[in-house]
Amino acid sequence: MSTERGANERMLDPKVLRDDSRRRFLRDAGLGLGWLAALDLSGELSPAFAEGAPSNPLAPKTPPLPATAKSMISLFMQGGPSQVDTYDPKPLLTKYNGQHPPESFGNAQFQDGQFKTSLLLGTRRTFGKYGQSGLEISDLFPHTAPLADDLAVVRSCYHEGFTHSQAQFLINNGWPRIGRPSLGAWVMYGLGTENANLPGFVVLLQGGVRTGSAVYGNGFLPAIYQGTTFRSGSNPILNLKRPEGMSAQDQRQMLDSLGKISENYIEERQQDAELTARLSSYELAFRMQMSAPEATDISTESDETKKLYGLDDPNAKAASFGGRCLLARRLVERGVRFVQVWSGDGMNATDWDGHAQCDQNHLDRAKETDKGVAALLVDLKRRGLLDSTLVTWGGEFGRSPTSDGGGDGPSDKGGRDHNPYGFTTWYAGGGVKGGKTIGETDELGLRATVDPVHLHDMHASTLAMLGLDHTKLTYRYLGRDFRLTDVAGKTDLAAKLKA
């Protein structure tokens, strides 16, 4: 018997599995960080313990309400795109460029100053009317603009978060601080996933996230609901590959032995969700060694599709974002429930945070994302997937209609401050009737004034489109029931999106 074979047999010995520490077992079994990162993954349990284990928490569930979408793709523009430079034109702002705001608009606090003492900054962008609807869209988006009749642009979003961390948690988790489950985690908790061989909640990053992984985490929900980061290519999850020297049969035997050891424990402790989730993650990771590389291998796409998404773009960031959008389509096509595609590296100041030279910042970000966004909508539509896939575009907040830093000194570089008082998000697919705007900001683009949509309303309506009642999607933690929308939230937006 070879030394290698003997080591494998010792690893599969139930006595060794009982006696060794958890850390040693994970090390010897080759269950590295990639396996532990798959704690949100679930699937059929090993036959050794399936009978005594609780039911699969990620099995697909029938939505309790009529649903217009069964999956969702969130296109998240990290840093906060300016509403007045993208989808909310303000002629009066341009007219008063360089002047102090009229007193009739009152005052508002920005992160770096006050509205009334700052100078107004008109846009340098040109807006045109597109589609049969005549929807007004900035020249930043020449590829997305022709798809105007598929977009429902909500111009009156707002919340209370000034900083990036507060705002990103609010938009993604419904709470301004760390600790709450993300929207994707709640969707997984409420609906499960339709693909037993892939995670149900996948996150596709460009780089660093200002708030860290908690912004797409599970919070106090069981660990199986957290987002799993994927990369394109043949190795989508680090440390997922089978250890050298271990055959598929050996790995299957190891998992069965682990199941046998855990069977009695699970039978005695039916509520041990953490152990069940861990075992489920091992099972799915075993299956993902075949399914994940295939799902993420965009090299199999046609040349026409690759060109559509801009994979041949000389701008490496544009090609990268297009690749993530293509991967998002491949994932929802395979039954993944929730995919979030991030634009911008928040840790290296290459996102939509236009404090200095906002116009140039947005030109750069739009060149990186516009083609991929448009390609995603076109591709979903021609494959019959847009009707069942809700697509959203937006950031954590908008930008100020004033010049950052007061505008009257050396610090004035044509930048815009953070603005949570009124900003834009658009929706497409999943039952959305496009070619329209919903809500308004004031004539300068400062505050949401007509049909204001709070972030809790956004979340309530998004869940409603997926067939979930936000008031009943609750989880008991620390003695009380929590929900994504806390104690607020209305679904009026969902009705307007579908009307």
Image (cartoon, rainbow, N blue to C red):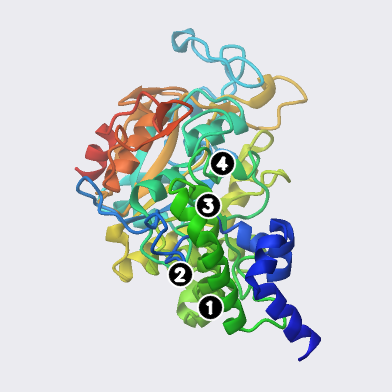
Residue at the limit of the structure toward the right, as seen here: 3
Looking at marks 3 and 4 on the same chain, the residue that comes earlier in the sequence is marked by 4
Looking at marks 3 and 2 on the same chain, the residue that comes earlier in the sequence is marked by 2
Badge 1, how many Cα within 10 Å: few under 14, some, many 20+? Answer: few
471 relative to 436, above or below: above
Horizontal relation, residue 52 to residue 69: left or right: right
Q: CA distance from mark 3 to mark 4?
A: 9 Å
What residue sits right under mark 1 in the picture? 290
Depth order, front residue of 91/472:
472
Looking at marks 3 and 1 on the same chain, the residue that comes earlier in the sequence is marked by 3
Q: Position of residue 252 (x, y in %)?
A: 55, 77
Q: Position of residue 201 (x, y in %)?
A: 47, 55
Depth order, front residue of 350/106:
350
Say which quarter of the image contains residue 464. Answer: top left
Write the residue at 57% across / 83% down.
Answer: 249
What residue sits right under mark 2 in the picture? 197
In front of the other: label 2 or label 4?
2
Badge 2, how many Cα within 10 Å: few under 14, some, many 20+? Answer: many
Describe the element under mark 3 as helix, strand or loop: loop
Q: Position of residue 303 (x, y in %)?
A: 50, 81
